[in-house]
Image (spheres, rainbow, N blue to C red):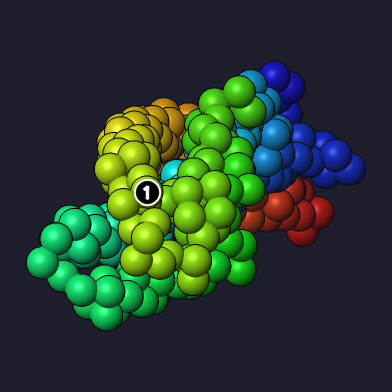
Amino acid sequence: MAFSTGGRINTNIGANQAYTALNSTSRELGVHQLRLATGKRINSAADDASGYVISKKMEGRMRAMSAALDNVGDAQSVYGVAEGAYQTVADILTTIKEKQTRAANGAMGSEEKDAIAAEINSLMNEINDISNQTKFNGTALLSGSYSKTFQVGEASADSLTVAFTSVSAAAGGLLSVAAGSVTSSNISTLTVDTALQTINTEIGKIGANVNRLQTKEANLTTAITNTEAAKSRILDADVAKEQIHASKLSILQQTSTAQLAQANSSPQAFLSLFR
C-alpha cells in the first residue's frame, strides 16, 4: 500500500485510498442491502455461480413435481367420477337381479311378467344414460374407449394409465340382451351376476388405484417440501446475518466518507507556508 507524506498536493494519495475504500465498502453494502430487500442470498450468478445453478435445478424439480401433484389430483377426480357412476350401475343391477328373481315365479301371469320386463328395460336404458353422461372434462369415461396416461412423478416414466370397462346395456354388453329387447320370455337369460361381478371388480380396481395415488400424493408433497428446504439453504438470505453485515458496513461507509473529506482538506495545511 502506498503512503504519502502529505507534502505533494498534485497527487493526493490519502484521498485516493480513502475513495477506493469508500467505493469498496459502498459496493459491499449494496450487496447486503439487496439481499435484505429481496430475501435472497443469490440475486445473480455472480453472487454464487454454483449455488445459482444448483438452486435453479432444484426449482425445476419442484415445478415438475408440483405439476405431477396436480396430475395426481386430476387422476383422483377422474376415478371419483367413474366410481360414483359404477356404484349407481351396481345398484341398478341389484334391482334388476331382484326383478329377474321375482319374474321366476310360476304364480305370475303374462301381464305381470311383461310389466317386470318393461321395468327392466327402463332400468337398462338408465344404465345406458349413465354410460353416455359420465364424463370428465367433456370426455366420456364409461364408453369403453377411455384410456389416458397421467404423469404422476418427476420423471416421464412415472406414469399411470387410467382406463375403464364399458357399462353399455347393448346386445352383447353387460347383460347380453340390449335395453328395450327384454321380454317375459328372455328375462331369465340376463347375465346379471356376471355384470355385477364386472362392475364390482372395476370398483375394486378404482379403490386400489386411488390408494396408490394417495401414496404418490404424500410422497410428492414430502419431496417438494424437502427440496424447497434444500433450495432455501442455498438461495435464501439469513436476514439477521445480513443485517449485522449491513450495519457494520454502514458505519464503515460513514468513517470512509469522513476520512475522504479529511484527506481532501489536508493539503490546505501547506498554504500557511506561503504566508
Furthest toward the right, the residue is: 10
Height in image: 73 above or below 85? above
Q: Amino acid at mark 1?
A: Thr
> Residue 170 in the image: x percent, y percent?
54, 58
At a point 89% along the width and 43% down the height, the residue shown is 10
Local SS, label 1:
helix
Number of marks in picture: 1
Residue with the mark numbered 1: 189
> Residue 157 in the image: x percent, y percent?
61, 23
Within 10 angstroms of label 1, few (less than 14), some, or many (20 or more) residues? few
Q: Is residue 88 visible?
A: no
Q: Quadrant of the C terminus?
A: bottom right
* Quarter of the rendering containing residue 60: top right
At a point 19% along the width and 57% down the height, the residue shown is 104
Name the side, left or right, on which 3 lies relative to 103. Answer: right
At a point 70% along the width and 19% down the height, the residue shown is 1
Height in image: 36 above or below 13? below
Name the side, left or right, on which 188 lies relative to 250. Answer: left
> Residue 216 in the image: x percent, y percent?
37, 33
At a point 70% along the width and 52% down the height, the residue shown is 264
Along the viewing direction, whichever of 8 and 143 lies nearer the viewer: 143
Along the viewing direction, whichever of 232 and 103 lies nearer the viewer: 103
Along the viewing direction, whichever of 220 and 137 lies nearer the viewer: 137
Height in image: 25 above or below 53? below
Name the side, left or right, on which 214 lies relative to 131. Answer: left
Along the viewing direction, whichever of 122 and 213 lies nearer the viewer: 122
Q: Is residue 110 visible?
A: yes
> Residue 119 in the image: x percent, y percent?
31, 75
Furthest toward the left, the residue is: 107
* Quarter of the rendering containing residue 217: top left
